[in-house]
Amino acid sequence: MTAPNPTDNTPRHGHRPGLTTAWLALLVLSLASTGATVLPVPQQIVATAVLVLALIKARVILARYLELSAARSWLSGLSVVIAGFFALVLGLFLIYPAAL
Amino acid sequence: MKQTSGIDALPGELLMWVLIFSELLVFGVGLLAFMAVRLTDPSGFAEAQSALYRTGAALNTAVLVTSGFLAAKALEYRRKDRRAQARLSLVAAAALGCVFLIVKGAEYAGKAAQGISYETHPFFMFYYLLTGFHAAHVLAGVMVLLLVAWRDETGNIEAGAQFWHMVDLIWVLLFPVVYLLG
Amino acid sequence: MKYESQKIALVYFAVAMGLFAIQVLGGLLAGWIYVAPNTLSELLPFNIVRMLHTNSLIVWLITGFFGAAYFLIPEEAEREIHSTKLAYLQLLILVVGTLGVVVTYVFNLFEGNFLLGKEGREFLEQPKWVKAGIVVAALIFLYNVSMTVLKGKKTAITNILLLGLWGLALLFLFSFYNPSNLALDKQYWWYVVHLWVEGVWELIMASILAYLMLKLTGVDREVVEKWLYVIVAAALFSGILGTGHHYYWIGTPAYWQWIGSIFSSLEVIPFFAMMAFAFVMVWKGRRDHPNKAALLWSLGCATLAFFGAGVWGFLHTLHGVNYYTHGTQITAAHGHLAFFGAYVSLNLAIFSYAMPILLNRDPYNQVLNMASFWLMSSGMVFMTFVLTFAGTIQTHLQRVLGDYFMDVQDQVAIFYWMRFGSGLVVVIGALLFIYAMWVPRKEIIERGATETPAE
Ligand code: HEM
Ligand SMILES: [Fe+2]
């Protein structure tokens, strides 16, 4: 990603997917993460998939619902923080994944 | 000419962003603590987690993101001066918030019926703390949405919607960690 | 001075500084008793000395806040204080109450009497009648300043200041409830003590700092206000549930350990923000205000508050740590630097700013004041280090190895000697400050040719 130009704050309405797309994406992603938990694959993979899906959902909410798509540097910053958070969660999970 | 960078670039109400960052920190740290304490008793945590009702929580995710969509829509309407539609969307968003709370209430009631409380296991202490604190925000959010449906200046709706999206965002972080991992 | 009624502040500051002197002398005596335990053990036992030390601290800080409010509200609201008479009546009530407290403690009068006797509660040690007097005084004060603000211009600074002062008074009401169950007593006691210093007092601190920054640096009000709102939001967000860090071991449910640990950790943020605010304002400021001493105290306040409250608070706020350090000299180290950095320095900053204006001594003496800053600050910082060392050793010997309390006290005696030394430096600094405020009339520092006094 290129660094955002701080002076360029023209709204990106042109190539910006609408709210409806965002909503549908969130529904599909939620369904996918619930679906992932019943797949017959190892715990580690399920966990990774679930957290990656959650990260994408969080980003959609930030970008579209909270309108951070108009403030790219904040959007990337927060995405990185949330990605870091999920990485920590995943790391803590993977120390002892097969629980039962 | 004022250049918009730094905190001036944040859309909407600045204080709402302060709140959003603070809440993200609190829930983030709480969830990490949960994951860390899990390591002291992974099988106990997994067993406790299996008592949760995942389908209800997944349903609640759908309810909440849909409600968030309606709140975002309301702001879009209000900006186009379609006030009636904006209000209707806000009330609908609040109604879905109530649905979330009813599902959550049923979940808690189910736990109580099984004799599960915050003292049963550390898992449930975190479960009640995290989901309970979130549910309290949903309750507050419903009231905020109704309030801004009534006092419907654009700035108000903007701030109300921001609050509601925060509740949504936190749920998206919380749900996979508490309900799905394990 | 623009408004005649700002003069009210002068008497408030005078009383505050008098009590400040008593407080630090009491502290010095208490520090001496630590190293020579039999000193005055019959006449003035340690618990009484300690009570004098802590309670006079609270009373003078609050008196200073009142004075600060009387000083800055007319300027912000752009009108005279609603009633000058009421303001003096309020002070009279406070002074009579304070004298009553001191006499009651020292001679242990009316022991056990519900209305007239002592209660044995740290920081909130007043006979009930004095508490009632304090409430009356607070009501008079709130009425007086609220009327002034309501009729005048409303600024973010006065709004936040009033919010803080209202909170201060309302929370004090919890002090009337004194359940005999010690755990319950503590639970309510913290509603006052914690929600004061880590809640509403922070609002007072932020607004007074904002006022000082506005005057001293000349940064736009709009910028100052934005900072102010963010700081206040962060303070309340973290501070209210942060109360949980006192509920770890008093019999409250275990989930408080997590609520307290998480929220109180975030309390560092507003203190950090206040420090950042002060430095950014000075750095951005266009004005070279001649009152260097007030600026020094303001920056010192923000910095030492961050270290004393923020860093030293965080040090022992996680329940895993507090399990070992609870009630050791670590607590004392933190309590000292936090109170000094945040609230003592804040008061001294506003005194330094306001006194020359009130006394019409602008030009005035800054060198002595600035010297007193360095004496007091370095004394307090040294004391904090010393107590932190003592507390670390104490924690290890007593809490980890299980040695007896008094045996451990003997082993850390050297630190108590050093604490006494640093306390002596602080007392000298405090007396020098009071002298510098009231006595010298002539300027020592040359004022720069291009500078114009702010106002
Ligand atoms: C200016 C603000 C503050 C002041 C004036 C202050 C003052 C004090 C004082 C006097 C005590 C001892 C109370 C007693 O036991 O009698 C205390 C205890 C404590 N403070 Fe603070 N404090 C401040 C801010 C903070 C902050 C921001 C934190 C956390 C980040 C913190 C954490 C604690 C903790 C954990 C204790 C309990 C210590 C123990 O268990 O013995 N404080 N504080
Ligand atoms: Fe506290």
Image (tube, coloured by chain):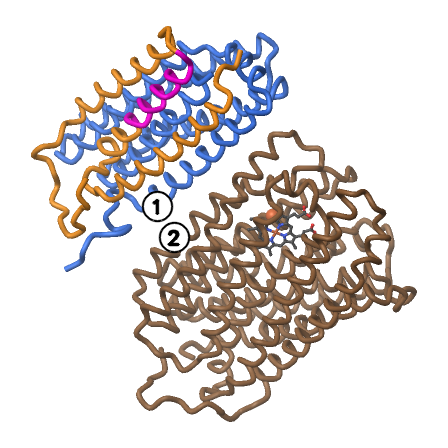
Q: Quadrant of residue B146?
A: top left
Relative image position of residue C200 (x, y in whole percent): 52, 52
Q: Quadrant of residue A22?
A: top left
Relative image position of residue C400 (x, y in whole percent): 75, 42
Q: In the rendered image, which residue does mark 2 sit on?
A: C229
Q: Chain of mark 1?
A: B
- Amino acid, disc 2: Tyr
Q: Which of B35 and C365 lies nearest the eye of the viewer?
A: B35
Q: Which chain is orange?
A: A
Q: Residue at x 82, y 56 (%)?
A: C409
Q: How dense is the environment of label 2, judged by Cα within 10 Å: few (below 14), some, or many (20 and up)?
A: many
Q: In the rendered image, which residue does mark 1 sit on?
A: B15
Measure how far apart labels 2 and 1 are at the Cα level.
7 Å
In the picture shown, does residue B66 fall above or below C292?
above
Chain B drawing hue: blue
The reply to whether residue B99 is visible in this rendering is: no
Q: Secondary structure at mark 2?
A: helix
Give the magenta range. A42-57
Relative image position of residue C14 (x, y in whole percent): 61, 76
Q: Which of C195 and C95 lies nearest the eye of the viewer?
A: C195
Q: Residue at x 81, y 61 (%)?
A: C48
Q: Residue at x 44, y 80 (%)?
A: C291
**Count of numbered marks:** 2
Q: Which chain is brown?
A: C
Residue A51 inside the magenta-drawn segment: yes
In the picture, measured across the screen, residue C198 lies left or right of residue C74, that is right
